[in-house]
Image (cartoon, helix red, strand yellow):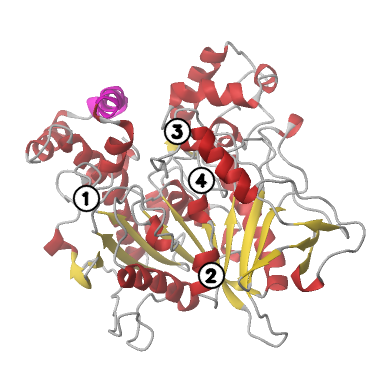
């Protein structure tokens, strides 16, 4: 759900670090003083990047015509309009407001003026060269935090190693500014999109990429979206939005799936709690509330701000949509980590974790039918170890592991393509183990950002994982021949099907395919059924 990396610095230290890396404001270039080799003409302007080690980086390109501020708060994103101006693309934009309860969100400079993207491409770019595959990263953060400014998602190292792809990172509205049901309020009839604005922002960013990426050397017809946690959930939900299939053909989803949604009833309940906390009665009241105050008040609905199965943008049953072929023309690479929820125990602390579980269970688990309660109790009773581990294993299954497997099952049932993985390397930390988001430093080639892992994973293993991701983006198949595999050994990744249920085990020193039944990744009898309740 998030990348809440424990930092050795204070929040202010981290802000200063980010400002030194990315600080500044992009301005128009009116004197013609720029290097045309670093400039790309797009629909909404010509953008000039910066070059480092033959990697050109374009930061802070707007992908909307108007930012969602003022009267456009809680309105659908506005498309760009033609613009002949020339603009700097030197600096990251500010990050979206999210939820004050998630520490990461407070590390960045925040603003409602936040819908921008970044692009990395390698030089040289020959005029006659084939267009490169494009990978578009959607960050995680529980739909409440995070941003493209996160140093983890600086893709310089990734593109330097994999020069045959172009990488884009996109922002979107978060928390109550991106996912707030408003149409039930007395003056809310004009806000029929507010519950899924974050997804609509992502769709608009992908539209911009489709229309402009060719100028950067990218192939608009070979786009892979990839993300982790809420970003992975976004990647699996986007195929269900009307019109999105024109913008991408492949999905890589790390530890996130179509269960990370809420019903309209749950959305209304969250809105009403927020309104009570703020003392507001109408949308007009909410529009008067400053963004940071909205962020602070949203702590009352912490980890409940999901996209909504509204029957407008998303179907009422996302799994059924997959089972009946809604995404069968898109190729998927999906997977999960062995000890997903241990990350949250590690991040919240034991007391914080216990408090969160105590508050969470009444929402759905305590309301289960007696027979289903018995199944859950049986599962928890069989978990050995520290007192927190039973609940951690349960929520790992219900939030991440079982939904990922069910998505692969649904895609296979519909005749679609799904490659599935199970990530197993562990941190030496006794609580973190192989927790949520622990793979990110390997994916983005940032071994220096391994605070959560407690150590740097094997270099060849990490490089192999990246090569698989890139191979999938290029060809739709993550398998590696011996000629391109970093260890010189072929990696044949079998498709997931409902008979053999083969997954690729991403073991640090033994990447290999294995039947799900041998590893017992999901508890088919005692936790798989929980996917029908989405996020318990």
- Name which quarter of the figure residue 120 lies in: bottom right
Q: Earlier in the sequence, mark 1 or mark 2?
A: 2
Secondary structure category for the residue under label 1: loop
Q: Are marks 1 and 3 in contact (CB under 8 Å)?
A: no
- The residue mark sitting in front, 3 or 2, is 2
How far, Cα to Cα, is label 4 from label 3? 26 Å
* In this view, 482 is above or below 378: below
Magenta span has 364?
yes
Residue matched to label 1: 428
Give how far across and how far down residue 243 sits, in percent: 61, 58
Which residue occupies 52% across, 41% down? 311
- How far apart marks 1 and 2 lie (CA) works out to 29 Å
Residues at marks 3 and 2, CA–CA distance in whole angstroms = 29 Å
Q: Is residue 214 above or below residue 42?
A: below
Q: Which residue is mark 4?
A: 314
Q: Nearer the viewer, mark 1 or mark 2?
A: 1
Residue 379 makes an appearance in the image: yes
Q: Secondary structure at mark 2?
A: helix
């Amino acid at each position: 759900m998030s990348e809440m990396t424990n930092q050795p610095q204070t929040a202010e230290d981290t802000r200063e670090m980010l400002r030194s890396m990315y600080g500044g404001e992009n301005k128009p270039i009116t004197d013609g003083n720029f290097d045309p080799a670093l400039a790309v003409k797009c629909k909404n302007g010509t953008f000039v990047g910066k070059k480092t080690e033959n990697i050109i980086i374009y930061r802070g390109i707007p992908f909307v015509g108007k930012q969602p501020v003022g009267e456009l708060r809680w309105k659908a994103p506005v498309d760009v309009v033609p613009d002949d101006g020339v603009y700097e693309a030197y600096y990251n934009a500010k990050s979206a407001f999210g939820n004050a309860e998630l520490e990461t969100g407070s590390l960045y400079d925040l603003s409602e003026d936040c819908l921008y993207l970044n692009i990395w491409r390698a030089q040289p770019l020959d005029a006659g060269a084939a267009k490169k595959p494009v990978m578009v990263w959607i960050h995680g953060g529980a739909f409440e935090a995070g941003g493209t400014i996160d140093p983890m998602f600086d893709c310089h190292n990734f593109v330097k190693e994999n020069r045959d792809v172009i990488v884009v990172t996109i922002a979107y509205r978060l928390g109550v500014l991106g996912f707030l049901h408003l149409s039930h309020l007395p003056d809310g009839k004009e806000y029929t999109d507010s519950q899924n604005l974050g997804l609509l922002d992502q769709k608009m960013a992908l539209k911009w990429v489709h229309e402009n990426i060719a100028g950067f050397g990218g192939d608009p017809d070979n786009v892979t979206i990839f993300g982790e946690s809420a970003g992975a959930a976004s990647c699996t939900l986007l195929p269900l939005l009307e019109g999105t299939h024109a913008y991408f053909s492949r999905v890589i989803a790390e530890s996130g799936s179509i269960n990370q949604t809420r019903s309209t009833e749950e959305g209304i309940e969250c809105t009403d709690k927020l309104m009570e906390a703020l003392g507001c009665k109408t949308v007009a009241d909410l529009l008067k509330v400053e963004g940071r105050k909205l962020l602070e008040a949203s702590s009352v609905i912490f980890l409940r701000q999901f996209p909504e199965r509204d029957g407008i943008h998303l179907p009422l049953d996302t799994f059924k949509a997959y089972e009946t072929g809604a995404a069968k023309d898109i190729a998927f690479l999906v997977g999960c980590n062995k000890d997903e929820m241990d990350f949250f125990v590690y991040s919240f602390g034991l007391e914080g974790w216990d408090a969160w579980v105590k508050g969470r269970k009444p929402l759905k688990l305590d309301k289960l039918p007696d027979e289903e309660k018995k199944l859950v109790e049986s599962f928890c009773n069989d978990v050995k170890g520290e007192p927190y581990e039973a609940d951690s294993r349960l929520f790992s299954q219900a939030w991440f592991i079982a939904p990922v497997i069910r998505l692969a099952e649904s895609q296979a049932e519909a005749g679609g393509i799904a490659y599935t993985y199970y990530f197993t390397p562990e941190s030496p930390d006794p609580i973190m183990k192989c927790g949520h988001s622990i793979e990110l430093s390997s994916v983005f080639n940032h071994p220096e950002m391994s605070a959560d892992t407690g150590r740097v994973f094997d270099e060849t293993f990490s490089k192999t994982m990246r090569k698989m991701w890139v191979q999938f983006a290029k060809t739709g198949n993550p398998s590696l021949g011996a000629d391109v595999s970093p260890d010189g050994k072929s990696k044949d990744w079998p498709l997931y099907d409902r008979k053999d249920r083969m997954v690729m085990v991403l073991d640090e020193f033994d990447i290999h395919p294995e039947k799900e039944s041998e590893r017992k990744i999901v508890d088919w009898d005692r936790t798989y059924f929980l996917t029908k309740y989405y996020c318990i």
